[in-house]
Amino acid sequence: MASKNLKIAVLPGDGIGPEVIDVAVKVMKAVCNKMGHKVSFQYGEVGAVAIDKYGNPYPDETHEICEASDAVLFGAVGDPRFDNNPNAKVRPEQGLLAMRKKLGLFANIRPIETFDALLDKSPLKPEVCKGADFICIRELTGGLYFGRPQGRSETGETAYDTCIYTSEEINRILKVAFDYAMKRKKHVTLVDKANILSTSRMWRELAKKMAANYPEVTMDCIYVDNAAMQLVQCPTRFDVIVTENMFGDILTDEASVITGSMGLMASASIGAKNSLYEPIHGSYPQAAGKNIANPLATVLSVAMMFETSFDLKKEGQMIRDAVAKTIEEKYVTEDLAQKGDKSYSTSEVGERLINLIQND
Ligand code: IPM
Ligand code: MN
C-alpha cells in the first residue's frame, strides 16, 4: 500500500476533550509511524475555549484549519458555565452546529457494536443485547435544528422552531444509508413520524423510491416512538437506521448505552468535501482534568477516520485490535472496570494501546 501524507485538523474543545484527543493523536502517530505514512496535526479551538479566546464558538481561524485539512479530529464542546446561564448569548454547542453547517457535514454515522466481554455493563439483559450490531445514520444539517424561522414572539408568549427538509437533503442521506447497507446485512430501517409530520411523509416517499434502486436491500419504515421501544426490546433486529436530525440525536443517545458504555462510541460526520470524527460522549465536565476519561471512543473514531476518509482498512483494524485487546485484558478506565478490579488512567490506557500497536 502506498504511503500517504495526512493533514489532520485537531479540535480538542472542552471538558475531557483535550485528554482523550491527546491519546488519539498519539495512537494515530504510532499507527502512521508503523505503516510509513506522514501525518501532521494543526490545532484549532472550538466550543467554550473558543468563546473565551475569540468570543465565537467556531471562529474563522478554526474553520480555515478545518477546510485546509484532509480530516478533522474533534473532542467535545460544552461547559457548565454556559448551561447554568440562561442569559448567555453564545453557547459552546452553537460552535458544533456552525461547524457542521459550514463544513457541510450532512451525514452523522454512529456504529453500535457490543463487546461480549462487556455485556454485563449494559443496562439491557445480556441475552437481549448480545450480538447487537447496527449503525445509525442521522441527517445532521437540516430539520428542526437549522430550520428558520426560529425564535420568540415580541411578547415572549410564543416560541417556535421550523422543521424543513428539501428532497435533495433527504436523497443524499438516504443514499449514504443504502450504500452502507450494501456493505452490511442489507437492511435499512427508516425512522420517521409519517402519521403526523409532512416532512416525514416526504422522507418515506423518497425512501421507497431510493429502495427501488437497491433491489438487494430490504427496507422497513417505523415510527420514532416505536423505534425508541424496539431499540431496547430487540436491538439485534437493526442493521442500518436512517433518520432525520432530531430523531437521530435522541435515538443515538439511547442506542449508545446498549454497548455498556458511552465511552466506546465513535462517530463520523461526513460531508461532500470534508469529514469529522468524534467520540459521542460529550465534554463530561465532572471528569475534566482528572485523567480518568475513557479514551477508547476517540481512538475508535481515529479507526473510522483511517477507514472512511483514507481507505486505510489495515490501519483501522490495527486500532480495533488494540482496543479489543485492552478490553479483553481489562486494561480499562473506571467506567469499564468490573467491581473490585483495578482501573487505569486515560494516559495509561493510551500507553498500553501504543505498546500493542508497536508490537503488533
Ligand atoms: C450530538 C450533540 C449535539 C447535537 C449538541 C452538542 C449540539 O448532542 O452530537 O448529538 O445535539 O447534535
Ligand atoms: Mn446528541
Image (tube, rainbow, N blue to C red):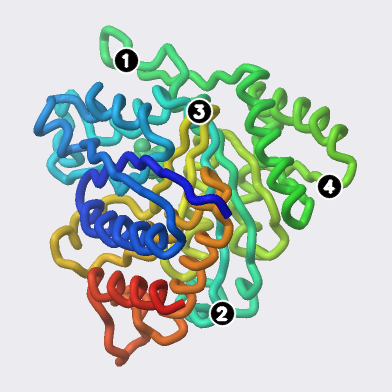
Q: Can residue 97 be seen in this snapshot?
A: no
* Some atom of ligand 1 lies within 8 Å of the CB belonging to the residue at label 4: no
Tell me residue 47's x, y (percent): 23, 37
Q: How many angstroms separate mark 4 from mark 3 (CA)?
A: 29 Å
Q: Amino acid at mark 2?
A: Asp
Q: How many angstroms separate mark 1 from mark 2 (CA)?
A: 49 Å
Looking at the image, tell me whether mark 3 or mark 2 is earlier in sequence order.
2
Q: Is residue 186 left or right of residue 151?
A: right
Q: Amino acid at mark 4?
A: Thr
Looking at the image, tell me whether mark 4 or mark 3 is earlier in sequence order.
4
Question: Pointer 1: what residue?
Answer: 152
Question: Pointer 2: what residue?
Answer: 116
Q: Residues within 10 Å of mark 2 (few under 14, many from 20)?
A: some
Kindly identify the residue that appears in the image at 21 percent across and 36 percent down: 45
Question: Pointer 3: what residue?
Answer: 273
**Which quadrant contains ligand 2?**
top left
Residue 218 is labelled as 4
Looking at the image, tell me whether mark 3 or mark 1 is earlier in sequence order.
1
Tell me residue 6's x, y (percent): 41, 44
Q: Disc 3 on helix, strand or loop?
A: loop
Closer to us: mark 1 or mark 2?
2
Looking at the image, tell me whether mark 2 or mark 4 is earlier in sequence order.
2
Q: Amino acid at mark 1?
A: Arg
Determine whether 112 is above or below 103 in the image: below
Determine whether 15 is above or below 327 in the image: above
Q: Residues within 10 Å of mark 4 (few under 14, many from 20)?
A: some
Q: Residues within 10 Å of mark 1 (few under 14, many from 20)?
A: few
Looking at the image, tell me whether mark 1 or mark 2 is earlier in sequence order.
2
Q: Can residue 91 be seen in this snapshot?
A: yes
Closer to us: mark 4 or mark 1?
4
Tell me residue 242's x, y (percent): 64, 41
Q: Quadrant of the N terminus?
A: bottom right
